[in-house]
Image: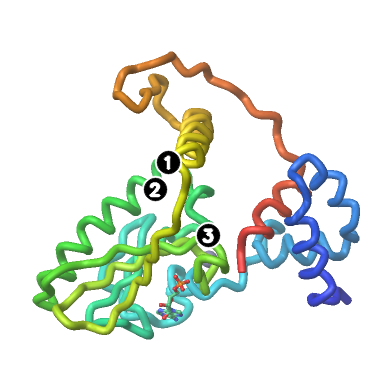
Amino acid sequence: MVNVKELQKKLQEIAKMPREEQAKAADMLTEEEIEFIQKQQGASGEKPQCIFCKIAAHEIPAKVVYEDDFIMAFLDINPVNPGHTLVIPKEHYEVLPQVPPDRAALIMNTVRILSGAVFEAVDAQGATIMQNNGAVAGQAVPHVHFHVIPRFEGDKVKIDMKPIKLEEKQFEEIQKKIIEKARTKAEKKVVYDISGKPIEEKKEEKKPESTKKEKLIKIKSRIP
Ligand code: AMP
Ligand code: ZN
């Protein structure tokens, strides 16, 4: 029997390690624990125990407002305003960076359609689109979802963004790092610098395949 608390502790420890050490650290997991994680994630062919997957499969009820082959949208069971809607991919992805580009485009287009539809349906005055990744960001359901929240003058929705202070140097360092990271992830071949000029033809770079263990740890370390 897998001790779930013990396993969570191990995964948290591994997640804190530098990336290079994480592959070695995977040996901290027993075969039984790896099998347990795979079952949880549906990797061994069994369906994951995910509430949004079950809604997508019509196994549990929801107030569905939109559905096509890939996407579903339904009313949030604990709305912060009337019309609060969730848009999900039917396939199970835990956080946004895991969603393939074509699916991401479909999700975003549905968010676009629903933001207009919800706005008109409840006679709103505005809308907030929100998407949380990871427990630290407030993600309670580890299946990618966008919140479409209609807004009204004087409503009780609070998105409390308090600015922090950063030095000019810190801004520049972060900007540089994000540009580099985004460049390796971007689909388009031509990459633009911040002034909008194309700066290079992006080469098709093939990253070494992560091992099964590494993949599991990477995923597991980001979800609640
Ligand atoms: P988040 O905190 O971003 O993960 O948001 C999860 C949202 O899912 C919350 O607003 C919940 O109210 C909503 N939710 C959880 N279970 C259900 C369900 N069975 N049907 C509809 N909405 C749900
Ligand atoms: Zn799911």
- The amino acid marked with disc number 3 is His
Looking at the image, residue 8 sits to the left or right of residue 27; the answer is left
**Which residue in the protein does label 3 denote?**
92
Residue 96, above or below 59: above
Would you say the beta carbon of the disc 2 residue lies within 8 angstroms of ligand 2? no
Spatial separation of the CA atoms under disc 3 and disc 1: 15 Å
x, y percent for residue 88: 40, 63
- The mark nearer the N terminus, 3 or 2, is 3
Spatial separation of the CA atoms under disc 3 and disc 2: 13 Å
Quadrant location of the N terminus in the rendered image: bottom right
Would you say the beta carbon of the disc 3 residue lies within 8 angstroms of ligand 2? yes
x, y percent for residue 89: 42, 58
Looking at the image, residue 43 sits to the left or right of residue 10; the answer is left
Element carrying mark 2: helix
**Which residue in the protein does label 2 denote?**
104
Residue 153, above or below 130: below
Number of residues whose C-alpha sits closer than 10 Å to that of mark 1, classed few (under 14), some (14–19) or many (20 or more): few
Which residue does the image show at 68% across and 58% down from the upper left? 221
x, y percent for residue 125: 11, 72
x, y percent for residue 100: 47, 44
Give the camera-side residue of 61 and 173: 173
Element carrying mark 1: helix
Residue 101 circle label? 1
